[in-house]
């Protein structure tokens, strides 16, 4: 995530946490870089940050793809495992007490979730199946006035995948109001 997008995410997370007093949720943890932004915003507001990931990597992080990192492959099982790196990231940042890590597939976790959320940050898989599943699973839990943040929104297909862009367009069509745009980061408010 570029610095300007990270700063924008932190700013809207801090605002949502302070205004709603509700937890902040991230879909797509990877190694925790954006989680520390949400966790610090949550800590300052006295709420918690939640992060959902199966920790096996999204499609572009698999062997043979551009973002594959062999250091994240568990040699015992031969699959990606970002959970240990994520835990080290939180420890190094001193934010372990402010994050609840939910390890599992986003739609499965969303199906059993029951608490309103002040912010939902969608930054998981970039296929239509995954991005749509994240949107459909988590936006019902977003409180009125809560913020939906979608990362990797590229209107031009030459710049990136289109699934997050389609989720963003769907949210607008379903009544969300755009609050800000920073690079590929879109922030929308639930009416």
Image (spheres, helix red, strand yellow):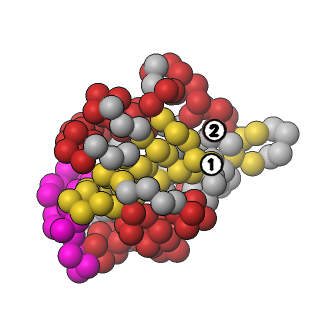
Q: What element carries label 1?
A: strand
* Earlier residue among tags 2 and 1: 2
Q: Is residue 92 left or right of residue 119?
A: right
Image quadrant occupied by the N terminus: top left
**Residue 173 included in the magenta stretch of the image:** yes
The residue segment tinted magenta is 172-191
**In the picture, residue 42 is in which quadrant?**
top left
Residue closer to the observer: 28 or 95: 95
Q: How crowded is mark 2: few (under 14 residues within 10 Å), some or many (20 or more)?
A: many
Point 63% across, 54% down: residue: 104
Residue closer to the observer: 31 or 90: 90
Question: Which numbered circle lies on residue 13?
Answer: none
Q: Distance between the residues labelled 2 and 1?
A: 9 Å
**Residue 30 included in the magenta stretch of the image:** no
Marks 2 & 1, CB-CB < 8 Å contact: yes
**In the picture, residue 6 is in which quadrant?**
top left
Question: Which numbered circle lies on residue 83?
Answer: 2
Q: Residue furthest right?
A: 76
Q: In this view, does 170 lie to the left or right of 80?
A: left
Pointer 1: what residue? Answer: 103
Q: In this view, does 34 lie to the left or right of 180?
A: right
């Amino acid at each position: 995530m570029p610095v300007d997008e990270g700063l924008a995410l932190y700013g809207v997370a801090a605002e949502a946490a302070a205004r709603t007093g509700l937890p902040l949720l991230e879909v797509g943890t990877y190694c925790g870089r954006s989680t520390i932004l949400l966790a610090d915003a949550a800590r300052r507001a006295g709420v918690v940050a939640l992060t959902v990931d199966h920790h096996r990597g999204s499609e572009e992080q698999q062997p043979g793809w551009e973002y594959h990192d062999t250091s994240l492959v568990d040699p015992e099982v031969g699959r990606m495992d970002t959970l240990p790196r994520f835990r080290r990231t939180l420890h190094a940042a001193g934010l372990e007490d402010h994050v609840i890590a939910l390890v599992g597939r986003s739609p499965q976790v969303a199906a059993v979730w029951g608490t309103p959320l002040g912010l939902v940050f969608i930054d998981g898989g970039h296929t239509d199946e995954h991005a749509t599943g994240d949107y459909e699973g988590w936006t019902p839990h977003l409180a009125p006035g809560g913020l939906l943040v979608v990362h990797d929104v590229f209107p031009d297909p030459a710049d990136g995948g289109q699934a997050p862009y389609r989720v963003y367009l769907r949210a607008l069509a379903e009544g969300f109001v755009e609050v800000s745009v920073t690079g590929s980061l879109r922030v929308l408010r639930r009416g």
